[in-house]
Image: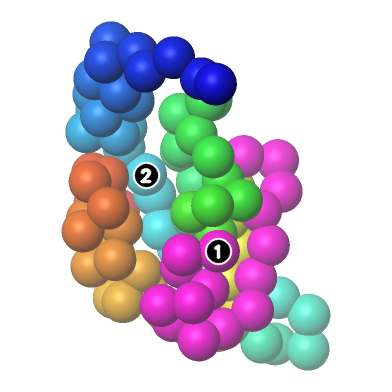
């Protein structure tokens, strides 16, 4: 049985609010657009965040090297979804 640690929950919330994520769209293989999200805190659960984004946007993707890559151009929709999850998106 795991012990509930309220301090751990508070620090996770602060990390989310203080992180400055960057969202960009790049042309990858065969000139297909790919949405890339970078700048997550080190202790973020990228697999869970990736799963939530893939379900919400109905697209494929993966997390690798601290970044999330989603297939397609989802720039505006990703920003809205990440802000709903409590992350701050920096303007480029």
- Residue drawn at x 31%, y 76% is 77
Left or right for 42, reference 76: right
Query: Circles 1 and 2: CB distance less than 8 Å?
Result: no
Q: Residue furthest front?
A: 1
The disc, 1 or 2, on the residue closer to the chain's N-terminal end is 2
Q: Nearer the viewer, mark 1 or mark 2?
A: 1
Q: Residue furthest right?
A: 29
Q: Secondary structure at mark 2?
A: strand
Residue 13 position, x and y percent, is: 25, 29
Whether residue 90 is visible? no
Mark 2 is surrounded, within 10 Å at the Cα level, by few (under 14), some (14 to 19) or many (20 or more) other residues, namely: many
Report the Cα–Cα distance between label 1 and label 2.
17 Å
Whether residue 4 is visible? yes
Q: What label does residue 51 carry, if any?
A: 1
Mark 1 is surrounded, within 10 Å at the Cα level, by few (under 14), some (14 to 19) or many (20 or more) other residues, namely: some
Disc 2 target residue:
21
Image height check: is 8 above or below 21?
above
Left or right for 70, reference 56: right
Location of residue 17 (image quadrant) = top left
- Does 69 lie within the magenta span? no
Image height check: is 25 above or below 50?
below
**Viewport quadrant of the N terminus:** top right
Residue 27 position, x and y percent, is: 63, 77
Image height check: is 60 above or below 78?
below
Image height check: is 78 above or below 43?
below
- Residue drawn at x 22%, y 55% is 83
Write down the region rendered in magenta.
51-66
The colouring scheme, among rainbow, by chain, secondary structure or one colour, is rainbow
């Amino acid at each position: 049985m795991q012990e509930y640690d309220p301090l751990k929950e508070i620090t996770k919330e602060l990390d989310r609010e203080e992180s400055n994520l960057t969202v960009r769209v790049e042309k990858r293989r065969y000139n297909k657009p790919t949405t890339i999200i970078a700048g997550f805190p080190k202790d973020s659960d990228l697999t869970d965040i990736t799963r939530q984004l893939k379900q919400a946007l109905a697209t494929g993707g993966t997390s690798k090297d601290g970044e999330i890559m989603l297939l397609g151009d989802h720039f505006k929709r990703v920003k809205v979804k990440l802000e709903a999850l409590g992350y701050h998106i920096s303007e480029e």
